[in-house]
Image: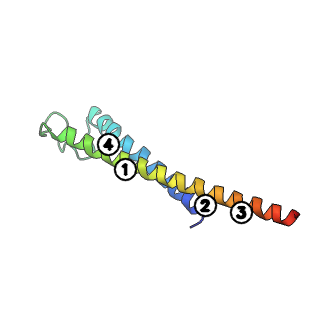
Amino acid sequence: MSVFWLRVIIAALLLAVVAVAAVPLLVLLDLGSGGTGYGVCGDGLSSCATDFGSGPALAVGLALVLFGLVATLRVMMRIVRRMERRKEIAEATRRLSAKG
């Protein structure tokens, strides 16, 4: 796999991190303006019947997804860095062998 495609994957992971982080904000903004919170509360905030643990469960789920995405992002960045380093070493070796 080339470095270009790995960078495309990294960009997609960054977009996914931003999207997952923005979900709670968008739901709260929709609920605050009288909406349904994109389906979280079907009839609006005043008649929303949720459990005591549903908020923390959602927060834990979002946090786990974020941590997983960030961990995957770090691994991909290391792979790209390692591939670029090997490419630079190969080019330097080629230049040195061409001189001598």
Q: Position of residue 73 (x, y in %)?
A: 47, 51
Q: Distance between the residues labelled 4 and 1?
A: 8 Å
For label 1, the residue is: 68
Q: What residue type is labelled 4?
A: Ala
- 3 or 2: tag closer to the N-terminus: 2
Q: Which residue lies furthest to the front in this view?
A: 100
In-front residue for pair 41/100: 100
User: What crowding class fits label 2: few (fewer than 14 Cα within 10 Å), some (14-19), or many (20 or more)?
Assistant: few
Residue type at mark 2: give it. Answer: Phe
Q: Mark 3 points at which residue?
A: 90
Question: What distance separates the C-alpha of mark 3 from that of mark 2?
Answer: 18 Å
Name the secondary structure under disc 4.
Answer: helix
Callout 3: 10 Å neighbours few (<14), some, many (20+)? few
Q: Which amino acid does label 3 sit on?
A: Ala
Looking at marks 1 and 2 on the same chain, the residue that comes earlier in the sequence is marked by: 2
- What residue sits 25% from the left and 35% below the top? 34
Query: In the rendered image, which residue does mark 4 sit on?
Result: 63
What amino acid type should be assigned to the residue bearing mark 1? Gly
Q: Which residue lies furthest to the right in this view?
A: 99
Label 1 to label 3: alpha-carbon separation: 33 Å
Q: What is the number of the mark on residue 4?
A: 2
**Which one is nearer the viewer's eye here, 90 or 10?**
90
